[in-house]
Image: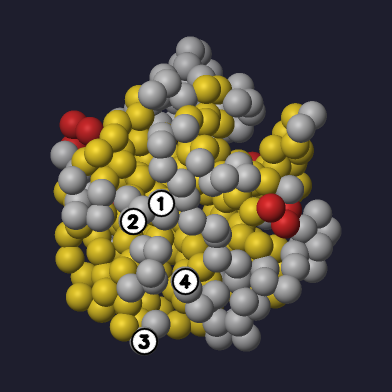
Amino acid sequence: MTPENVTGEIAHHAEAPVWWPGWGGLRWVDGTAGDLLALRPDGVTRQHIDDEYLAFARPRSGGGLVAVGARTLYLADDVDGETRAVGALGDDPRVRMNDGCCDPRGRLLAGSMAYDAAADAGSLLRLDADLNIATVLARTTISNGVGFSPDGRRAYYVDTATHRIDVFDVTEGELRGRRAFVVIPEEHGSPDGLTVAADGSVWVALWGGSAVHGYDAAGQRIATIDLPVPQVSACTFGDDDLGTLYITTSAQGLGPDHGSEAGSLFAVRPGVRGLPVIPFAG
């Protein structure tokens, strides 16, 4: 499988792609720019949201979107409308939010990390529809990809520093029984963002590994998608049939003469289909 470069080097730190028909297809973030990007038929548009960092965004079940900035939660009532700050997600300037998703009940899961990746400085938070906040996991280092199995009974989670994808049982909406699902050898890179397909397979971006790996529900690798850039940050399934895997990449920390396609959005058809994104209930 050879991915196609869809956009060219349009972002500095592309992350967190999401496909949602209600907002016209694919959106993703340029994290360090604080911008939400949208793939349009005539090119890519940008919406500036946070002046420090933009971690990810998700559609809302009642319309509009929710966006997670460095330490601020934003809501918009229209997908292309102005966002408004509605809450704080921390007050330590050394820590920012990172990746996340919505659980099967429509609650927002949002992870964090220290700017210097200090051990145990991050956490995984859960926001209910009324914006009440609970801590799901404390003392994480680089809280990253989160996703749920097609039946909602398992949750997959990456704390990049562990070099693992972990799996939880989901019991009455709570994550229980954390254990290793896949261990990523250091020479393959570090696990970053992930997505789950309709057949239960798990697809993870490998930061520093120039690849996306696919694993079946038993944790056996079933696919390797090589990319011409070192820092592969996240992936999601999209298009009308959810059969295209969109992959974000980053130029963060690379010199101006890195000579790669880092910061581009790539696409490939891996032969499986994704799951519809779960919107935020708030």
Report if the CB atoms under discs 1 and 2 are less than 8 Å apart. Answer: yes
Which disc, if any, is residue 103? Answer: 4
Picture coordinates of residue 259, whole percent (x, y) = 48, 12
Left or right: 196 in relation to 52: left
Q: How many marks?
A: 4
The amino acid on which the numbered mark 3 sits, given as a three-letter code, is: Glu
Dot 2 alpha-carbon crowd within 10 angstroms: few under 14, some 14 to 19, many 20 or more: many
The amino acid on which the numbered mark 1 sits, given as a three-letter code, is: Ala
Mark 3 / mark 4, whichever is N-terminal: 4
Dot 1 alpha-carbon crowd within 10 angstroms: few under 14, some 14 to 19, many 20 or more: many
Q: Secondary structure at mark 4?
A: loop
Which disc, if any, is residue 200? Answer: 2
Q: CA distance from mark 3 to mark 2?
A: 20 Å
**Residue drawn at point x = 37 percent, y = 40 percent:** 205
**In which image quadrant can residue 122 be found?**
bottom left
Left or right: 183 in relation to 10: left
The amino acid on which the numbered mark 4 sits, given as a three-letter code, is: Asp
**Residue drawn at point x = 63 percent, y = 26 percent:** 7
Q: CA distance from mark 3 to mark 1?
A: 23 Å
Q: Nearer the viewer, mark 1 or mark 4?
A: 1
- Asked if 240 appears above or below 135 in the picture, the reply is above
Which disc, if any, is residue 172? Answer: 3
Q: CA distance from mark 2 to mark 4?
A: 16 Å
Query: Which residue position is annotated with label 1?
Result: 197
Which disc, if any, is residue 114? Answer: none
Q: CA distance from mark 1 to mark 2?
A: 5 Å
The amino acid on which the numbered mark 2 sits, given as a three-letter code, is: Gly
Q: CA distance from mark 1 to mark 4?
A: 15 Å
